[in-house]
Amino acid sequence: MSTVQQRTAPAGPAAARPALRLRLTPVVVVYLALVTLLVVGSVLVGLRGEVLLDQAGILNILTRSTALGLVAIGQTMVILTGSLDLSVAYLIGLTSLIAAETMAGQNGMIVPGVLLALAVAAAVGLVNGLVITVLKANAFIATLGVALILRGYLENNYTGPAGDVPRGFQHLGYDRIGPLPVAALLMLAVAALAWWYLSRTRPGYHMYAVGGDLEVARLSGVPTRRVVVTAHVLCSLAAGLTGIYLASRLGSGAPYVGTDAGYDLESIAAVVLGGTLLAGGRGGVIGTIGGVLILATLDTIFDDLEVDPFFKDVVRGVVLITAVALYARRMMADRTRGRLT
């Protein structure tokens, strides 16, 4: 075999393998995992004589996905900038109460109730962003501190549900278009808007730049403080939408509706499961929705199988750790190939 043949013979398979790796992006992997979970779950539920993906099962998965999906979309934005938000769970409870108490059972107060809840959510996000950027506080500590302030307010002023959502507004939480819940369609619309913002606008590009390398972004002329503050405001607005949606489901506001469901850590788990790096700079909303659907599907399967709640948390923890480990190994492999080439 000639020297030229020796050099070119391995080129075909070697070129094919990187091409395959490029196709297996984290987004592709998370949706392949979702399909696998649906197949395995259908088999396990079928062994009990039930059906996972009948109309009731699909409705259950989509309903579970809606609230978590909304808050996870906002969490994606702050994590992309290298930050995070631990105040969202208490903010969900606060905004549900603001909306319900402002509406007070009157159809004419629906719009003021929604706008006031979103205004308060935006204000909380602004505080989070300013504490992080101006006071240079760590995002974990800053948003945890805001969460504790919100908890103190809720515990001091509420002992249970309050307010009254008018019946007309409850259509948001329960109406369907065909087999699809209206609220799930709203969540997908918010996801589409967030995808457009992140991938088609200059501020969206700046979020990736800040998360990739804050100092490089600053030296390149990116207004890093404004980007981080904007991300936190958008995250809090998403949490506010979640609180409004849950108020429509419950018929009133509930101070601990966000913390009881663990939407702070659950949203971070969905974002990481969807392939977004906690360090920021890589990921997106499409993967996050896949992570949300995986968590919602797991919950639905566990309920159908009547699995012990403790075991549910164990399995979800294993799934999350496995996903993070796989993504970390993939990043190391990509860096190694980059150095070699």
Image (cartoon, helix red, strand yellow):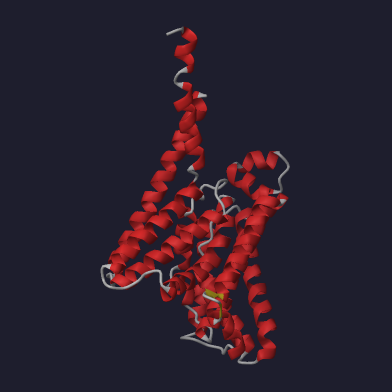
**Residue 221, quarter of the rendered image:** top right
Tell me residue 56's x, y (percent).
42, 76
336 or 155, nearer to the observer: 336
Looking at the image, is 268 positioned above or below residue 215?
below
Judge from the rendering whether residue 62 lies leftward or rightward of residue 299; answer left or right: right
Image quadrant in which the N terminus is located: top left
Looking at the image, is 288 positioned above or below residue 119?
above
160 or 188, nearer to the observer: 188
Looking at the image, is 8 positioned above or below residue 31?
above
Tell me residue 97's x, y (percent).
56, 82
**Residue 42, quarter of the rendered image:** bottom left
Q: Which residue is found at the position 52% from the left and 76% from the top?
A: 93
Q: Which residue is found at the position 36% from the left and 59% from the top?
A: 39
Judge from the rendering whether residue 285 lies leftward or rightward of residue 219; answer left or right: left
Tell me residue 115's x, y (percent).
68, 77
What count of labels does the image hold? 0
Residue at the far top in the pictured view: 2
Q: Which residue is found at the position 51% from the left and 71% from the top?
A: 67
Q: Which residue is found at the position 57% from the left and 90% from the top?
A: 164
146 or 296, nearer to the observer: 296
Looking at the image, is 238 positioned above or below residue 136?
below
Tell me residue 69's x, y (percent).
52, 65
- Asked whether residue 134 appears in the rendered view, the answer is no
- Asked whether residue 181 appears in the rendered view, the answer is yes
